[in-house]
Image (spheres, rainbow, N blue to C red):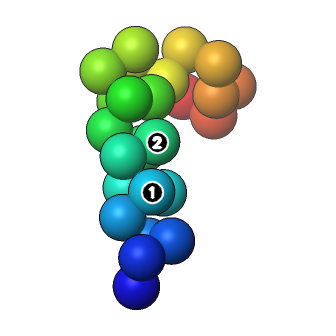
Amino acid sequence: MRFWRREQHLLNGLKRKGISFMPNS
C-alpha cells in the first residue's frame, strides 16, 4: 500500500495541472 500513496500523489499533481496531458476529456 506504499506504492499506492505515490500513485495518489501523482494523480493529485495531474489533477491540479488539469490533466491536460490526458487526451481523454
Mark 2: which amino acid?
Leu
Mark 1: which amino acid?
Arg
Q: Is residue 5 above or below residue 20?
A: below
Please, what secondary structure does the residue beneath circle 1 have?
helix
Instruction: Name the residue nearer the viewer: 8 or 21.
Output: 8
Please, what secondary structure does the residue beneath circle 2 have?
helix
* Residue 18, disc: none
- Which residue is depicted at the point 40% across and 85% down? 1
Q: Quadrant of residue 20?
A: top right
Q: Residues within 10 Å of mark 2 (few under 14, many from 20)?
A: few
Q: Residues within 10 Å of mark 1 (few under 14, many from 20)?
A: few
The residue sitting at the bottom extreme is: 1
- Residue 18 in percent (x, y) is at 39, 17
Figure quadrant of the C terminus: top right
- Which residue is depicted at the point 40% across and 14% down? 17
- Which residue is depicted at the point 32% across and 38% down? 12
Judge left or right: residue 9 versus residue 6. Answer: left
Q: Is residue 18 above or below residue 1?
A: above
Disc number lying in front (1 or 2): 1
- Which residue is depicted at the point 36% across and 64% down? 5
Check contact, mark 1 vs mark 2: CB within 8 A.
yes
- Residue 16 in percent (x, y) is at 30, 21
* Residue 6, disc: 1
- Residue 21 in percent (x, y) is at 64, 18
- Residue 15 in percent (x, y) is at 35, 30
Q: Quadrant of residue 11?
A: top left
Q: Is residue 25 above or below residue 12?
A: above
Judge left or right: residue 19 versus residue 15. Answer: right
On the image, numbered disc 2 is attached to which residue?
Answer: 10
Judge left or right: residue 2 versus residue 3. Answer: left
Q: Quadrant of residue 22?
A: top right
